[in-house]
Image (cartoon, grey):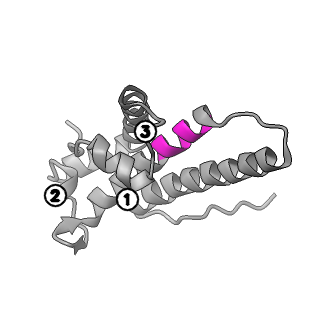
Amino acid sequence: MPARFPDIDLNVLRTSTRLDGTVTLERLREAAIDAVVSVNADLHAWRVRQADAGHPSLADVPAPVIGGESVQLARYRRAVFNLTLADLTERYRGYDSTKSGGQQAEDLELTICEARRNVSWALNDMRALPRSTIELI
């Protein structure tokens, strides 16, 4: 059985990602569930290896502790929170052809890209993989 991962508190997620009341609780929950499913799928093989090594939960995986908590828990939340943010930002961006609307769309695109980058980095940090992949063409 794979190692257990922690539950996600939607209030903490909302506060951490600075989502306002525009995003309903139902939509936040749906996006968070999608993010958890995706993150867990990405980490499945790693989770199985951790469980086989005798670490039944993410908190039991050997890692530094900061503020009384394993950094692995913080990394997991970072991946889920940022994937949720990216998904919701993509869904909620609107179209506005004015100059200010174009700038807002660019800002949202930057937010989405940064959130997805943060997901990738958090997952790589959890698995002790490099953050960058460089290929020769």
Q: Residue at x 84, y 38 (%)?
A: 97
Q: Quadrant of residue 42?
A: top left
Within 10 Å of the Cα at label 2, are there few (<14), some (14-19), or many (20+) other Cα atoms?
some
Q: Do the residues under discs 2 and 1 have CB atoms within 8 angstroms?
A: no
* Residue 94 rendering spot, x and y as whole percentages: 69, 34
Q: Secondary structure at mark 1?
A: helix
Judge from the rendering whether residue 18 lies leftward or rightward of residue 25; answer left or right: right
* Residue 127 rendering spot, x and y as whole percentages: 39, 58
Q: Which residue is mark 3?
A: 21
Answer above or below: position of 63 versus 31.
below
For the residues labelled 2 and 1, the Cα–Cα distance comes to 13 Å
Look at the image and give the residue range highlighted in magenta.
83-90
Q: In the rendered structure, does residue 27 fall within the stretch colored magenta?
A: no
Q: Which residue is mark 1?
A: 126
Q: Residue at x 59, y 34 (%)?
A: 92
Type of residue at label 3? Gly
